[in-house]
Amino acid sequence: PLVDRVIAIEAGGGVVADGPAHAVFAREGERLKRLGVWVPGAAPAAPPRRAAADGEAIVARDLSYLYPRGEGPALDGVSAAVRRGSALAITGPNGSGKSTLAMLLAGLLRPRRGEVRAFGDEPWRLRPRTLVRRIGTVFQDPEHQAPRGIPRWRRCDRIRQSRRAVHRRVRGRAPPFGARSRRVRLLEPLTPDPRAPLARAHPLAKIAAALVLMFTLFLTLDPLTPALVLVAEIAAVPLIGIAPRALLRRAFPVFAAAIGIGFFNALLSGNVGGGIAIGVRLVGIALAGIVAVASIDPTELADALTEHLHAPARFTIGALAAFRLMPLFADEWDTIALARRARGLDDARGPISRVTGFFAMTQSLLVATIRRGTRLALAMDGRGFADVGCRTLARPRPIVAQDWALIGASFAVAALATAASVALGSWRFFLAR
């Protein structure tokens, strides 16, 4: 049989019936019908309708919301009202803003413009413990219904008792019937303007040019060579097709770490000039890699590795798929945060609570990542990516004269910076004492 065991749980907590399907329906069928449970061979009884109360529970006026990476508002000028004791259905095509409106009404998002009032208060201003007592939210993904990291002392007594009752009942020890997850977005790829000069260059040419500059800076400890290379790199930033502000915001942690290393080196060694040289050198190495990688399309890079370096197709396509999933992981992180707020978690505002909440959200994201990766691996194997046979390229791209010119320009910058440093007597090999 399709179903060989039935467990019916009462709304207020506790197990109504448990046993083989035919026995449960024969013994408790009439009672289950009265409770509104479907029983084979009979239509479920309609639940009693409650009289609609007067007044409005939630009122929204002129709502507007723009997601951080959205090109336009997800909602603009939307008004709605939910009356007490009534049910409201929001319909519309995909991408019309149904979920956004629901999260605004539930107090999970703050409107960019307009106002939401739920039982007299603005729900987005309420603390999580207060919000969860007034508005309940059911997410589309069942995994977000019970976020990980819920402390035991925060669980509802009714839920705890129901879980114990079900556990005892399933294990055959039940009493008689009637007893009682902020920004990963640092990992999200940037999208350059395809019309920019460096954005059109071959991915391997950009990587080669960056490696030339990075190797040049790695060989020397003087401050002049990295300073000159850094000036050339800054001049190349407008050519990659990414707004300098967005690039700086993404690269700020790396730059801060490089400057910090230089500062502490100067502090501990007592050599201020040496510390400055190390800081500028690390910033130049980091910027060379960032300028190159930020302007590379992941799909073009995977094709180039397969075509010119003969990298295994299974590895490159798997890495490409993982890179493409970064925006989804960023969205998953935001959804976990909303789910934790909807469940009344992370209510404390101290540093300890923030740290524990971060690790709980990280655990939830890790589980979601593993599950998504497993599904992706099965899909890839189902489409023959495990086959080692001969494959063709859908987008072959040769390395042309402009790409060699880019590599030559990087050699020229490295040579001129090194020559200027040698001429002034400041160049120093990194292994020299």
Image (tube, rainbow, N blue to C red):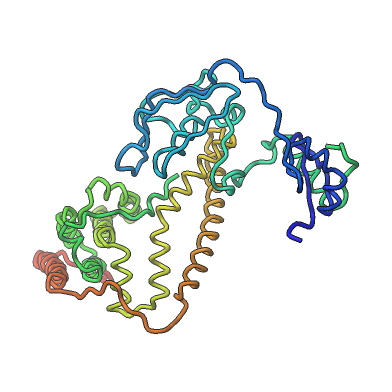
Residue found at x 42% / y 45%: 94
The one nearer the camera, 205 or 411, is 205
Q: In this view of the protein, can residue 181 be seen by the observer?
A: no
Residue found at x 37% / y 34%: 75
Residue at the bottom extreme of this rendering: 389
Q: Give left or right: position of 167 versus 55.
A: right
In the rendered image of this protein, does residue 276 appear above or below residue 11?
below
The one nearer the camera, 240 or 255, is 240
The one nearer the camera, 225 or 152, is 152
Q: Give left or right: position of 405 versus 62.
A: left
The one nearer the camera, 5 or 49, is 49
Residue 368 position by quadrant:
bottom right
> Residue 235: x and y, percent?
14, 55
Q: Give left or right: position of 53 versus 378.
A: right
> Residue 70: x and y, percent?
33, 42
> Residue 45: x and y, percent?
73, 36
